[in-house]
Image: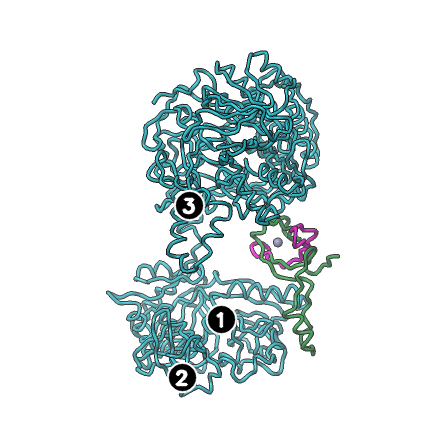
Chain colours: A green, B cyan
Amino acid sequence: MLYIKCPYCGLRAQKEFSYGGDATVKRPNINEEVSSEDWDNFVYMRKSPRGKHIELWQHIAGCRQWIKVQRDTATHEIFQTAKVTEEIR
Amino acid sequence: MSQSFRLNKEGLINRNKKISFTFNGKKLFGYEGDTIASALIANGIHLVGRSFKYHRPRGFFGAGVEEPNAKLQVEFNGHSEPNVNATEMELVEGLSATSQNCWPSVNFDIGAINNFLKMFFPAGFYYKTFMWPKSFWYKIYEPFIRKAAGLGVASIEKDKERYEHKFEYCDLLVTGSGPSGLASAYAAAKNGAKVILAEDKPRFGGTLLTDDVSIDNLSGKDWAEKIITELKSMPNVTVKNRSQVFGYYDHNMLVMFERVSDHLEKKSKFTPRQRLWYIRAKETILSTGSIERPIVFGNNDTPGIFLSAAAKEYMKVYGVLVGKKPLIFTNNDSAYETALEFKKNNVEPIILDTREEHSSELIDEAKSKGIDIRFSHGVIVANGYKKVKSAKIGKLNKDKNSFEKIETIECDCICVSGFWTPSVHLASQSGNKLKYEEKIDAFIPDKKKQHETSVGAANGSFTLEESLKHGFENGSNLSAKITETKTEITIPNVNEKKYGAHDKFWCMPLPKNENPKRFVDFQNDVSVSDIEIALREGYRSIEHVKRYTTLGMATDQGRTSNLNGLQLVSNVENKIVPEVGHTTFRPPFTPITIGTIVGREVGMEYMPTRKTPMHEWHEKNNAVFVDAGAWKRPRYYKLGSETLFEASKREAKNVRENVGICDVTTLGKIDIKGPDAAEFLNRVYTNAWMKLPVGKARYGLMLREDGIVMDDGTTTRISENHYHMTTTTAQAANVLSHLEYYLQIVWPELNVNVVSTTEQWAGAAIAGPKSRDMLSKLYPDLDVSNDALPFMGYKEAEFFGVPSRIFRISFSGELAYEINVKSDHGMFMWEKMMEVGKDFGNQPYGTEALSTLRIEMGHVAGPELDGRTIPSDVSLNGLVSKKKDFIGKNSLGREAFNVESRQKIVGLIPIDRKSSIPEGSHIVQDQNAKLPNPKLGHVSSSCWSVENNNPFSLAIMKDGKNMIGKKFFAVSPLKNKSIEVEVISSHYVDPEGKRVRS
Ligand SMILES: [Zn+2]
């Protein structure tokens, strides 16, 4: 079971979180034209990297904040966690 | 039977407490502190089971977790448990053990014929033989395998025992209380670290209990006792015996299995039987020790053949002799300690040492005690079927592959030692890639992936001095990093015997024309020839050899067979062991009970039960409940001997004719506040929200980004910047996370807050033509006329003195209202409604009537919004704004969403107006068509229309709107039904929606 450091609450067990997918995907702006290709890329296309990956988790059984987690998908090592408004290098 | 193999004095058992038990029906005695194994051996019983494949007689081989054979069916404390390791289970009064995998009895087992047919059971036998013909599988092969295979019998009784889970955090977890574990725990404890020390066995000390050593002038056992006593007195230390750390998971999460009360005769009601510990450790010391490995020889599975260290443990811990005429067969010095122990107890052993004549401290001591030592010797084959009677031994030539001399000598047990294998399971589970250490011919931990450090024998250090030193150093350094305190500890003086080098010798050769079975894996009956066959047939990867031969795949996970298997493969393949590699170690290290994994999450505690504030009233009034997620909702209220069908029809009819009330508390409720709330809703929902006035509700539809309908519900503008959203019961949690996602990540610039208020409000729907009359009685001071409170209107008013919210919304399609009060007032509201409603023919209605009402109105719900439908599929395209952007809008233009033939919602009625259409039925053109019969759609929801008094269903059907008026078949192979149906509009009742506005 992973041990995830919520930037608001501290280290908590994976049980308290829910996984939310790739954090590097950016939704096209609302009320702006978007090409079908860009839209399809946003909705459907995801990379499944082996190694470092920045993903979203929500602390559903805690502060309910969505957070960023940089994790190795092969070893599960977590390098960094951050608020969604912060950048992960 | 008397305990004729019990020594007079030796051992750590309590001779003052006799314990009676039975084995295969025979009444026997042992002492408190015995295991089933030690008590049986004391009684001279060695034959305890039959082997898995060949049903060969099997006895004990080890004295603990390494035991591959002695798995028994054990009844105690009122339950029966299969596959209990006889070498681990402690004796309790009244325990009854029986042999497994034998019929009719362990002494005469019909399955043993497999032993004589063994040429037909080589490696891969099951794979090769049972492949074809295919039709034989079900009738012949599978029943045969099922009967022949398998170990014990699982109980079909409900497990009455209590199991617990515990979550714990510590600075240092130490797994194993041998010398290195004790030293680590002690050093860390002295540094002020929070320490957990786990020991699998009932007694602490590991090899200190059996080795002839001294530490600071104390015997090993006394030193262990001193350290444990001190650790137990420290508030920062938790010391646990009978506790096996069996799994090493991500981020230093280790899982431990504690046998809390299996060894107790009486226990209090709330004492759990076993406990599962989830331990998050900052650092872990793996002091799991090592397991002796056997040397492979002919018939090496005969009862009476033991690991040499096990024989020593039986003497020193249990005061039991495994035999009175022992043969010690070894390639190293450690077995000499076993020989010396026999000698001490006046038993004359003979040592067969595969090494050439040489000298070492232990050899010299054995010589001086007059023990018969035969160098360059080994056991070729053990004789005796149910117990060792003699052994054919051979003097090896220099090539160690042929014999100078062969003779047969009498013996009643053989104690074998092929050197030691570090227990690296936990290290390997943690992600540590192991490395091969040639000095000890075994794998030891290499670079760590997690915070683990192996010490002592688990790390390949086989001397006490080194183990203690590593233990103290690592315990101290690892904990000092955490506590930032370092207490100096003097490493104690040690007195131990020096071992000479071991012989790299694993498998006795066979003389010409002799071909006895030589087992590598006892539990799965894998022999040398099986591995040779696998290699001959082209299996190269050790993982493939493992699966083909089943080597190391039994419950003992190859603890005694692993390295010998690897040595064999490397010999045949002419490779060195590290090139062959090792198979993966997986948790659990030892079998654990399902009860422990489940813990307290059984029955009522399986998941939380959510009850509405009116639950007790429903219960008192004969409600039959249905699960809606964790919620309990009344499905119908049973009057007299009514069936579900009759009751729901009555309740629905009453809503159409008079008025009914329904508990709608379970609907998801989300409070939305902030100056940008309207803009947010406008983006979340497909329809327009900017102009909704205060005091009005609106039905809304929300999509996922891929255009699929996510949920629907009404949202009401309570005040300028305050909205009350409702969601379906099922989607409440998902919708909240969805809203939070957009507010926190996508549009953080919007000034809006959302919070779930589902449990803050109790809700009741009042529906039916008489609902306004009833409402006016509930709110005598309020104008509830159609003008003052129109459809989709909202008002706040006092409900007999308590604040309430009135929404004029309808799910039933009738004139209807929903009243919300604070949860604490829910019961009050409900009872008042029942009291006031009497004059209007009010009756409560459950979810079944609610479904009927919405289905015949053509209102969609979960079965239609099933994660595959877009708004136009379910006739909700009127709610999709063309003017504004919203979540999922861009996806609605996709080609597949706009083809003519796309499935659309329709209504279905049976041609005979009588036959109910099962939900899930497929719609086909021709009920007799050849399979696969093209499917045109499926029935999503069915009811008995109370308005028209015949069955009615909603269906999602290809090109649905153009099918109206046509006839098809609804077929349900599950219910063996085929019903001719006509397609009609999905709005069966009041298609213009006049009633809700009346
Ligand atoms: Zn948090």
Q: Secondary structure at mark 1?
A: loop
Q: Is residue B655 magenta?
A: no
Which one is closest to the eye, mark 1 or mark 3?
Answer: 3
Residue at mark 3: B149
Residue at mark 1: B866
Q: x, y (%) of residue B820?
A: 45, 67
Dot 3 beta carbon under 8 Å from ligand 1: no
Q: Which image quadrant is residue B968 in?
A: bottom left
Residues at marks 1 and 3, CA–CA distance in whole angstroms: 44 Å
| Mark found first going from the N terminus, 1 or 2 | 1
Q: Residue at x 54, y 66 (%)?
A: B735
Q: x, y (%) of residue B212?
A: 58, 19
Residues at marks 3 and 2, CA–CA distance in whole angstroms: 56 Å
Residues at marks 1 and 2, CA–CA distance in whole angstroms: 21 Å
Task: Name the amino acid type tagged 3.
Answer: Ala
Q: Is residue A65 magenta?
A: yes
Q: x, y (%) of residue B657?
A: 32, 78
| Mark found first going from the N terminus, 1 or 3 | 3
Task: Name the amino acid type tagged 2.
Answer: Val
How many C-alpha atoms fall within 10 Å of the one at disc 3: few (<14), some, or many (≥20)? some
* Nearer the observer, B621 or A25: A25
* Nearer the observer, B567 or B343: B567
Q: Chain of mark 2?
A: B
How many C-alpha atoms fall within 10 Å of the one at disc 2: few (<14), some, or many (≥20)? many
Which one is closest to the eye, mark 1 or mark 2?
Answer: 2
Residue B983's disc is 2
Tell me if residue B876 comes above or below residue B281 in the rendering: below
Dot 1 beta carbon under 8 Å from ligand 1: no
Q: Secondary structure at mark 3?
A: loop
Residue B608 seen in the current view: yes
Q: Which residues are magenta?
A: A59-82
Q: Secondary structure at mark 2?
A: strand
